[in-house]
Amino acid sequence: MKILKNALLSNFSNFKIGGPAREIVLIENSEELKEVLEGDFLVFGHGTNVLFPDEGLDKRVIFNRTGLFHMDGTWIVADSGTSLQEVVKASVDRGLSGLEYLAGIPGTIGGAIFGNAGAFGKQIGDYVIEVEYWKNSKLIKEKNLYFGYRESVFKRKGGVITKAWLKLRRGTGKEKKIMENILSRRAKKHPPHNVPCAGSFFKNVVLPSGEKIPAGALLESVGAKGLRVGGAKVFEGHANFIINDGGATARDVLTLAEILKRKVKEHFGIILEEEVIIVRAS
Ligand SMILES: Cc1cc2nc3c(=O)[nH]c(=O)nc-3n(C[C@H](O)[C@H](O)[C@H](O)COP(=O)(O)OP(=O)(O)OC[C@H]3O[C@@H](n4cnc5c(N)ncnc54)[C@H](O)[C@@H]3O)c2cc1C
C-alpha cells in the first residue's frame, strides 16, 4: 500500500476538487484493505461520484484499488476496487448478458454497488447476488441489499464493501452491439473524459406513480445550461452535469447547485436531490 501525508484530495477526484487529507492510503489488494479499516476513515473507489471539501479532511482517506476478479460460467466474483468497465467488457467478451447496459459508467464495483449505479433502465443491483463487507470490525456476507434508485443498504447503513458476487445470463449475441450503441449515445450527451465532473449532479425525480422526470429536462427548462459560479459551470451539452471549467472550488460547485435547486423549486415546486456524494469537512 502507499500512504501519502497531506496530499490533495483533488488528485483523487474526477472533479479535480478537494483540499489536503491528513492521510491518503492507496490500497492495492483485499488483504491491505482489511488492515487499514480502523479509527476515523472514509473509503472511496475511483472518486467519480464525489465532491471533496476545499478545507480537506482531517482523517484517513482510503482509495480502494483492489482489482482481482474472476468469471465462472455466468458468475462474476470481484474485489470491490475492480473497475466496473473492466468487468463490463470482460462479461460482453464472454458472451454474457446484463452489464452491457452499464457500459461507460466510470468507477469501481464497490462505488457502483454503494449507489446502485445504472443507466438505460438497468442498474448493477439487478445482477448483484451477494456482497462481502466490513463493519464494526467484522467481515459479513449479505444477500439482502435493498437496492433502489441510486440506493443500497450501504448508503443507508454504512459498511465497507470488499467483494461482490454477480450473476449474469447467457447472451444472445447482441450484447457487443448494445454496448457500442450505448457508448456512442453516452459520448454524444456526456462531457468528454478530460472534462472534470462527477456525473449527473442531481437525481431524476420519481413521481408517486413510479414515472421518472429527468432532472436534466427540468434544469434545461429553467435555463441552467452555461450558468457559472467561479470555475463551476453547467455543461452546455447536458444541464444535469456541473463541470469544473478550471480552478473550481467545492464552494463554487455548491453555490451553483443551490442556484439550480432554487430555480427548479420556484418554477416546478420540486426540490432536487443531489446524486453526487458531497463530503463535508470534518
Ligand atoms: C462522466 C461520468 C458519467 C457517469 N455516469 C453515470 C451513470 O450513467 N450512472 C450512474 O449511476 N453513475 C454515473 N456516474 C457516477 C459514478 O461513475 C458512479 O456513481 C460510480 O459507481 C462511482 O464509483 P467510484 O468507485 O468512483 O465511487 P467514488 O466516487 O469513489 O465513491 C462514491 C461513494 O461510494 C462509496 N464507496 C466507494 N467504494 C466503496 C466501498 N468499497 N465500500 C463502501 N462504500 C464505497 C464512497 O464512500 C462514496 O460515498 C458518472 C460519473 C461520471 C464522472
Image: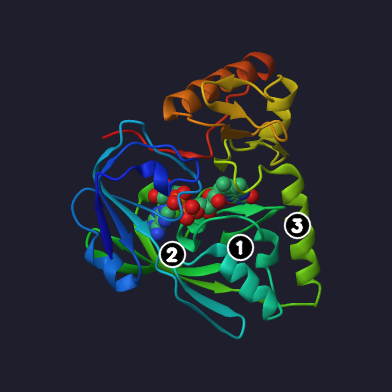
Q: Which amino acid does the dot numbered 3 rest on?
A: Ile
- Of badges 1 and 2, nearer the viewer stands 2
* C-alpha distance separating marks 3 and 2: 24 Å
Q: Which amino acid does the dot numbered 1 rest on?
A: Asp
* Label 3 vs 2, first from the N-terminus: 2
Secondary element at image label 2: loop
* C-alpha distance separating marks 3 and 1: 18 Å
* Residue 193 rendering spot, x and y as whole percentages: 62, 49
Secondary element at image label 3: helix
* Residue linked to disc 1: 126
Q: Are marks 3 and 2 in contact (CB under 8 Å)?
A: no
* Residue 273 rendering spot, x and y as whole percentages: 54, 32
- For label 1, the crowd category at 10 Å Cα-Cα, with few meaning under 14, some 14 to 19 and many 20 or more, is some
- For label 2, the crowd category at 10 Å Cα-Cα, with few meaning under 14, some 14 to 19 and many 20 or more, is many
Mark 2 CB in 8 Å range of ligand 1?
yes
* C-alpha distance separating marks 1 and 2: 19 Å
Vertical relation: 48 (above or below) 166: above
- Res 81 label: 2
Q: Quadrant of the C terminus?
A: top left
